[in-house]
Amino acid sequence: MFEYVSDFDLIEVMGEATRDESTAIAQRLAAVAELFVRRSGELAECQWWCADGCDAVAAEISAAQNISHPRAVAQVQFACALWHRLPRVAQVFVSGVIDFRLVSTIVSRTENVDDALMAELDEAIARHCGKWMKLSKTKLRDRVDQWVAKFDAAGVRVPPKVEQRRYFEITPASAGMADVSGFIRAEDGAAIDQRLAAIAATVCANDPRTPSQLRSDAAGAMGRWEATLVCQCGSEQCPAGAEREAASSAAAVVIHVLAEQGTVEGTSDAPGYLSGFGMLPAESVRDLAATAKLKPVVMPSASPDPGYRPSAATREFLRNRDLRCCWPGCDKPVDKCDVDHTVPYPAGATHASDLKHYCQTHHLIKTFHAGWAERQLSNGTIILTAPTGHTYLTQAHGAALFPTLAQSTGELPTPIVEEPGAYRSVMMPRRKQTRAQNKRDRINAERRQRTELIAQEEQQRQTWLAKNYEPPPF
């Protein structure tokens, strides 16, 4: 691509591309903020809905950008904060002088500033932020906080309490593996550490695994409510074997793995799929299959199920065909989704050709927010039309990975669908507080914390002066 470009021109390309990237991001965020403003009037009554106006706009954005719903919601909130509270900084961003890292820090650190003071602060930061590009993350945070303190001391962000930062996550990693991270209470960490050590110690000294690998495998055993590990020493006289036979499981834990029959039998190396975590290497599939209960995927009946709820067989097929939410960009696993009739029941049949999985948010948006339309093909593919008229095609994830699941489940007659009732919205689940109220309460609480800290610091300063201050010697 750059074979005949000089070193000087390469540097020029980098600089120009960086500026263009900032401009493009700023323009995208400006479009997001403008779309939210245009939708605000018609969606104003939805602020108490569980799937509110922000969710409705995020649904359009996630489909257009092919991103998850949480990312789209965050983008709506960020874009509105930038273009409505910091318009002068936004203009600097459009010019390409500053990048997204700097802008995101400014937006975050000014979130608690009183609206009445934002215009002056925005103007001041816009005049100086072009000089901050070389600052590190910590220095940049301090520089923004310094300007916030000049205009609104109570608006300086307060670091979250250590206890509030607790989390524990298990996410997909490389094929067949998961990544575990967390921040937990010390006493819980000690308990888990001892439990892992105890389970890892149930193998004999000849087990070939390293201590770290044993602890990793012990975490899996703990998740299955098992008290011991299977020793891999290979000896029939292994003393750990007898101990394992004597131990009983407290409860059964079920995981679902989807794979082609050839993979299980060893005639194919096509990977399988571990629900919620992604692709699983063929060797791992066969290891699991050696001791697992095998159940073939059965194609659903050509006849619709009676009533509104699908039969167990139909649900099982839909679970394997869809694997995830069928909304464009959404990746919620099916066990966190609802089964939705594409053509509403009773006009729509309770049949695999009219059923698919939507997460709760997208199910509510499709059902209660006007302007969305959808059509389902007999292989599970969804053709979604947004309020703007844009169309998005989503193939069922399981059908894309396993062609056997992509075959037609039968064509259904074209139904006559009635227009939704005028009072349909009364069925929408309600929030306890609106997003705006939640944000207001958080900001007010943090401003109170900052005010208390300022008062404490001033009290400490006055106490120190009372003890140590001496008048000048004249």
Image: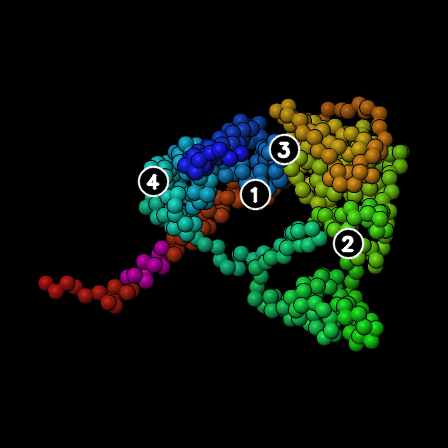
Residue drawn at (78%, 43%) of the image: 319
Q: Which mark is residue 433?
A: 1
Query: On the picture, is 72 further left or further right than 464?
Result: right
* Vertical side of 355 occupied by 250: above or below: below
Q: Please indicate, yes or no, whether residue 121 appears anywhere in the rendered image.
A: no
**Callout 2 touching callout 3 (CB < 8 Å):** no
Q: Which mark is residue 128?
A: 4
Q: Secondary structure at mark 3?
A: helix
Residue to which mark 3 is pinned:
63
**Callout 1 touching callout 3 (CB < 8 Å):** no
Please state which of residues 361 and 448 is positioned toward the viewer in this rendering.
Answer: 361
The kind of residue on which mark 4 rests is His
Q: What is the spatial separation of the Cα atoms under label 1 and label 4, in whole angstroms?
A: 38 Å
Q: Secondary structure at mark 2?
A: helix
The image quarter containing residue 54 is: top right
Q: Please indicate, yes or no, whether residue 333 appears anywhere in the rendered image.
A: yes
Taking the view exactly as shown, the residue that stands out farthest to the left is: 474
The kind of residue on which mark 1 rests is Gln
Q: Secondary structure at mark 4?
A: helix
Residue 289: x and y in percent read 82, 55
The kind of residue on which mark 2 rests is Glu
Q: Which mark sits nearer the N-terminus, 1 or 2?
A: 2
Q: Which mark sits nearer the N-terminus, 1 or 4?
A: 4
**Callout 1 touching callout 4 (CB < 8 Å):** no
Q: Which mark sits nearer the N-terminus, 2 or 4?
A: 4
Q: Which mark sits nearer the N-terminus, 2 or 3?
A: 3
Q: What is the spatial separation of the Cα atoms under label 3 and label 4, in whole angstroms?
A: 37 Å
Residue drawn at (36%, 55%) of the image: 454
Q: Which mark is residue 283?
A: 2
**Dominant secondary-structure state across the stretch colored magenta:** helix
